[in-house]
Amino acid sequence: MDQALLLIRNELPAPGLNLAARSGSCHQCLYQFLAFVPPSNESLRKPGTASVMVDTQRPLTLLLNSSVGDRDLCKIQYHFGEFGNYSLVVKTLSTSTQTVSCDLTINEGPINSYLPILFAFLVYMGILAILIAGRLLMKIDPVRNWVYKKLNPRATDRMINSELGSPNTTDSLNCDPTPQSWSTGSRRRLRSLDTFRGLSLVIMVFVNYGGGKYWFFKHESWNGLTVADLVFPWFVFIMGTSIALALGSMLRWGSSKWKVLRKILWRSFVLILLGIIVVNPNYCLGPLSWDNLRIPGVLQRLGFTYLVVAALELLFTRPDSGTWEGQFPALQDILPYWPQWIFILVLEAIWLCLTFLLPVPDCPRGYLGPGGIGDFGKYPNCTGGAAGYIDRLLLGEKHMYQHPSSGVTYQSTMPYDPEGILGTINSIVMAFLGLQAGKITLFYKDQPKQIMSRFIIWGIVMGIISAILTKCSKEEGFIPINKNLWSISYVTTMSCFAFILLLLIYYLVDVKKWWSGAPFLYPGMNSILVYIGHQVFANYFPFKWKMQDSQSHAEHLTQNLTATTLWVIISYILYRRRIFWKI
């Protein structure tokens, strides 16, 4: 999978050729040796041949040079197709000028490995069309009454014979036969937040299960973004938004700050404990391999980030988020909380100072690269710069993630943890920006235009900051977008996307009510259960089974989509039964 066959035919005489390659996703990397191609046998007029497997995920740069003298003969850039069969013919065009030609030909065409994605998209769109058609039919009174009578004839007869008349249209559309108190609470709750959280979680589950083994559903090797790099920061962002709403609600209902603080501490402790004990054990060494237990992790970072941001908000939140009576009422969601902003700015200053000023042994100051063969192999043991050094120093190499995403492309050998200590600072900043979105919804409740305009402004501001930090480039900016480092440009970019996406969902779900939030609403309301469940049961049927062809994107995609869909169905069943696992 993700490979093609390349046959090299060398018609040149001795001494032979060396073939090396460099991936298009590997920035400033050394060429990696692929094969030695023997010289042609002039007496038998038989060319020297060699065959290699080449990567098809990204474009490759092939370099052919003489095995003696290291003279470069030709350089070819090409994006090979999966399961394709190619030939590279090297021959002399002119004996007098020693001009060499390198011709790449296709012996057998590659397959279109993206067709399974198109087919899956059409299947899900078909299901969606059927559901929409069903809901439209349910708006027709005779059809709705007939369905209710078939499903529950006794209850329907009683309803028809009573003074209440036919079932209420809104209730039937929501398909939520819950008591009035429950529906009233649901209407007050912003469904867009649960929908956004559920959308992030569903994508996270899908990419964690493998994402069909497509490269864009895996984490980027170092700088840059893929689909997999979007979801975790969005989850952190919406957690910050929920903190603003939840704390304000608890204080309005009369809970003391000490009681709320105890709840914050307990929830943070449980999240961290679940991450270390349930999700993180190295099962290859046994579930109780404490000597090699990974200490950082997704739930650990969520737990610590929640602790800091919730405690910070608790210090300054007010039970009643009314209009601020000071100057600049347009900034009433910012100015009263200036100590919070000072705290966050100090945190970010600490990240910048440690990242760019901390001396790291045998590494340049401010190094943000992947190590390995990156930067032309100058700093092979400097993966992550200060972030990696701090984790190795404080946690120990055995308690860190052992297989970072940079290992394959950049061939880095140092352990590096994408949920490490230094990156947690910027996850706190990310959650704080989400907290700001929550304050906007509180201060401007019942004013959707004000809320949406502020979401747009924040999105634009975050986008401008990202453009400045990155110089609108993947590799050449002051601080590149990097999920492994959780760089500040990564945070501002993801916050920009989060504000805009939350704006769209809020407009569709809570303002216009054109969309109920389904199916993402259901996992969004049971996020911890779905996240932990998909990790614990990842290798159990029906979430995983033995495949007939493990080299097929189609089979991997079918398995991963099935597993993800099952968790959505499970969350829907729990939603219908009003079962929500809260910490």
Image: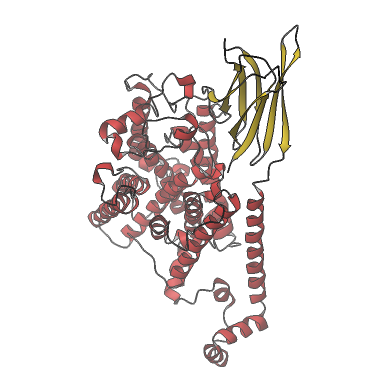
Most distant residue in the bottom direction? 161
Please state the horizontal and vertical placement of residue 377, each as a whole percent of the image.
46, 20
Quadrant hosting residue 3: top right
* Residue at 62% from the left image edge and 37% from the top image edge: 4
Judge from the rendering whether residue 72 lies leftward or rightward of residue 222; answer left or right. Answer: right
- For image coordinates 65% across by 31% down, the residue present is 7
Image x and y of residue 302, in percent: 36, 47
Front residue (pair 11, 29): 11
Image quadrant of residue 513?
bottom right
Q: Is residue 155 left or right of residue 72?
A: left
Q: Is residue 224 above or below residue 356?
A: below
Q: Nearer the viewer, residue 368 or 435?
A: 368
Question: Quick check: 15 above or below 382?
Answer: above
Q: Is residue 283 among what the camera can see?
A: yes
Q: Nearer the viewer, residue 27 or 159?
A: 27
In which quadrant will I find the N terminus?
top right
* Vertical comparison of 244 with 574: above or below: above
- In the image, residue 246 lies at what x, y percent? 37, 56
| 250 on left or right of 463 | left
Residue 452 visible in the picture: no
Q: Residue at x 75, y 9 (%)?
A: 95
Number of callouts in the render? Answer: 0
- Outermost residue on the front side: it is 43
